[in-house]
Image (cartoon, coloured by chain):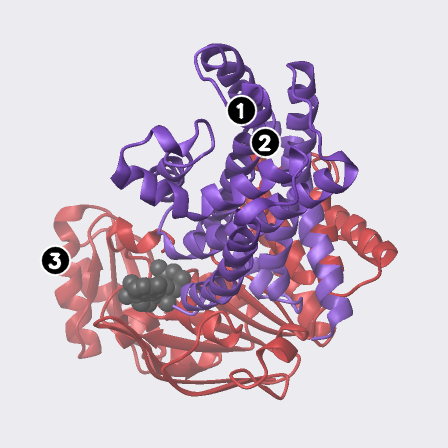
Chain colours: A red, B purple
């Protein structure tokens, strides 16, 4: 349903996309994961006809994005990274306007606006101008805007940024339900948990290139499968614990001082847990917790990009341009 | 993209713009309070000092204020377009299967409505302070037609500038520094023949004066005078230049 081949985009000397390949099968959710400035928004803007690439090919719902942008627009819904609402209009007026511009008859546009306002918990605020909406309300209305025409393909750029935990859960349910109903979704996210939980497939991008692709499980296995993890009683014993565990596993230990947490990759379970407990005790390390754990996507990310996913870059990159 | 859809989407955009005006009535100050202020100020402050051969000053003045007002109102549309470009609304429209041209035509059509309102308000207030047109209905309609054509052309200049500038604020300044001198160095408020030669030559040949003179002649019972043809030429010429320029600048702006 969505296809990108060798997408290139330069902004001055910035190489925002350096030959990005993507494909999303019908009725599935692809999460585009990458650190700030990886090129996620640029990719979404190209696929949604807002930006022309310098090179490459893109297709949405079988339509060539570069040759027939108008036809593509009839098949997709977009909720951009920054909410695009008319602040002077009410929530309802915004949705009805979008519906009519989507060629829906007036009555149908009104009906869908009412439905969506209800579904996004905005009924109470429906007839207030959106200037006074909270960040989360804007976000939800923006997403409702993407759904007005019930398009077969949805592009959601960080759909849960700015939502509270309840709103986020609601959004997850909604996106899953849409995909079950046959909608194809391409979403970007900074939250690894979100990609893990929602997406059928995850594409990790960095510096405008695809660097890994697979299900959450596949990516985790690639990052070294399981880890043995301990939490020590006192900070002073962290180093000793790290060296004991590194010796056991034969690989470097990862230490998190604040969490008093040490972990190492392990190849198999066989006897390693009891040995670890015995040797840590012998080394005088007091344990608060010990156990096996599959690598988190955070660790996957770290392994693939060399930087943690949640690292904030400079503030200027966060601002809309 | 069929003509019918373009028309429907243009009306949708006009409807949005009118909602903005309803919620932010300040958007109408430039076509209501401001021209009224000009009429009253010029009529009573300068009216006594300025002698116009063969007619009252207010009858002379009105054409100038009409044209000045529709010109400013037209160009101002660029500020609103620049706002939409800045706050992402244009991105929203561009992601919809609507006629993309309607984003711009909706703007300029709204301006036409604003200009009509301005003319009606000024005509009314003018009558209250002694404005007595002698051109009859035919003269009045022709005069209004010319003003609106000129204003419409300038709203395409506004669109072009709105697409060109980086911020709405920058455009406010640009409008003030370009249109304001044009209205004063013209026949809007005083006859050009008392101006020094260098200024007079400029004033008599610039488009604002041509349009004002033609409008004035029609309102006061003439048939347009020697400036009618140049006035029409300037208005339609401006439209033929600014329309494609606006479309080109807008396209360039959104494809960055
Ligand atoms: N309009 C623009 N002009 C100049 N540079 C741009 C523009 N848009 C994006 N860039 C640059 O292209 C690169 C990719 O940006 P993009 O917005 O696609 O990243 P992202 O993955 O969406 O990041 P984030 O997680 O912060 O939203 C960045 O270096 C950014 O500074
Ligand atoms: Mg982004």
- Same chain for labels 1 and 3? Say yes or no: no
Q: Residue at x 45, y 57 (%)?
A: B160
- What's the CA distance linking mark 1 and mark 2? 6 Å
Can see residue A166?
no
What is the residue that sits farthest to the right in this orientation? Answer: A107
- What's the CA distance linking mark 1 and mark 3? 76 Å
> Percent position (x, y) of residue A308?
28, 63
Which of the labelled discs sits on residue B34, or is there none? 1
**Could you classify mark 2 by the number of other residues whose Cα lies within 10 Å: few (under 14), some (14-19), or many (20 or more)?**
many
Tag 2 residue: B31
The yes-or-no answer for disc 2 within 8 Å of ligand 1 is no
- What's the CA distance linking mark 2 and mark 3? 76 Å
Which of the labelled discs sits on residue A239, or is there none? 3
Residue B35 drawn above or below residue A263: above
The yes-or-no answer for disc 1 within 8 Å of ligand 1 is no
Comparing A135 with B220, the one in front is B220
> Percent position (x, y) of residue A309?
32, 63
Quarter of the picture containing the C terminus of chain B is bottom left
Q: Residue at x 34, y 73 (%)?
A: A300
Comparing B229 with B15, the one in front is B229
């Amino acid at each position: 349903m969505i296809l990108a081949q060798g997408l290139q985009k330069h902004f001055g000397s910035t190489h925002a996309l350096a030959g990005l390949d993507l494909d999303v099968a019908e009725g599935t959710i692809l999460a585009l994961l990458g650190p700030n400035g990886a090129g996620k928004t640029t990719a979404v803007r190209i696929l949604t006809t807002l930006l022309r690439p310098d090179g490459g090919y893109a297709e949405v719902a079988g339509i060539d994005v570069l040759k027939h942008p108008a036809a593509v627009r009839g098949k997709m819904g977009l909720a951009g990274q920054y909410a695009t609402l008319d602040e002077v209009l009410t929530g309802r007026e915004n949705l009805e306007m979008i519906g009519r511009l989507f060629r829906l008859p007036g009555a149908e546009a009104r009906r869908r606006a009412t439905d969506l306002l209800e579904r996004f918990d905005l009924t109470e605020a429906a007839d207030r101008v959106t200037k006074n909406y909270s960040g989360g309300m804007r976000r939800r209305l923006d997403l409702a805007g993407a759904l007005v025409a019930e398009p077969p393909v949805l592009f959601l750029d960080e759909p849960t940024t700015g939502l509270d935990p309840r709103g986020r859960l609601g959004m997850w349910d909604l996106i899953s339900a849409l995909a079950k109903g046959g909608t194809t979704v391409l979403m970007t996210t900074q939250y690894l948990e979100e990609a893990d939980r929602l997406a059928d497939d995850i594409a990790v991008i960095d510096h405008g290139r695809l660097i890994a692709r697979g299900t959450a499980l596949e990516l985790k296995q690639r990052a070294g499968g399981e880890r043995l993890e301990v939490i020590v009683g006192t900070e002073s014993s962290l180093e000793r614990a790290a060296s004991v565990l590194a010796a056991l596993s034969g690989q470097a230990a990862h230490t998190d001082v604040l969490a008093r947490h040490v972990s190492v990759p392990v190849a198999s379970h066989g006897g390693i847990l009891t040995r670890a407990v015995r040797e840590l005790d012998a080394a005088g390390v007091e344990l608060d917790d010990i156990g096996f754990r599959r690598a988190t996507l955070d660790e996957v990310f770290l392994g693939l990009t060399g930087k943690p996913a949640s690292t904030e870059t400079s503030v200027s990159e966060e601002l809309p341009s | 993209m069929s003509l019918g859809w373009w028309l429907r989407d243009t009306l949708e955009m006009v409807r949005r713009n009118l909602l903005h005006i309803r919620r932010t009535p300040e958007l109408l100050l430039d076509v209501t309070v401001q021209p009224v202020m000009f009429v009253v100020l010029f009529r009573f402050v300068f009216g006594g000092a300025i002698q116009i051969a063969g007619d009252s000053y207010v009858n002379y003045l009105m054409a100038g204020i009409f044209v000045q007002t529709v010109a400013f109102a037209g160009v101002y549309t660029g500020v609103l377009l620049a706002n939409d470009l800045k706050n992402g609304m244009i991105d929203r429209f561009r992601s919809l299967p609507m006629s993309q041209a309607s984003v711009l035509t909706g703007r300029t059509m709204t301006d036409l409505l604003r200009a009509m309102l301005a003319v009606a308000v000024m005509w009314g207030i003018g009558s209250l302070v002694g404005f007595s047109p002698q051109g009859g209905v035919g003269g009045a309609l022709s005069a209004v037609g010319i003003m609106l054509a000129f204003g419409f052309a300038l709203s395409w200049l506004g669109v072009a500038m709105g697409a060109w500038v980086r911020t709405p604020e920058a455009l406010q300044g640009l409008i003030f520094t370009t249109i304001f001198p044009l209205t004063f160095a013209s026949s809007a408020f005083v006859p050009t023949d008392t101006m020094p030669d260098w200024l007079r030559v400029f004033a008599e040949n610039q488009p604002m004066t041509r349009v004002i003179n033609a409008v004035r002649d029609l309102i006061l019972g003439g048939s347009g005078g020697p400036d009618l043809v140049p006035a029409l030429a300037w208005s339609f010429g401006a439209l033929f230049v600014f329309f494609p320029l606006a479309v080109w600048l807008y396209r360039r702006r959104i494809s960055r």
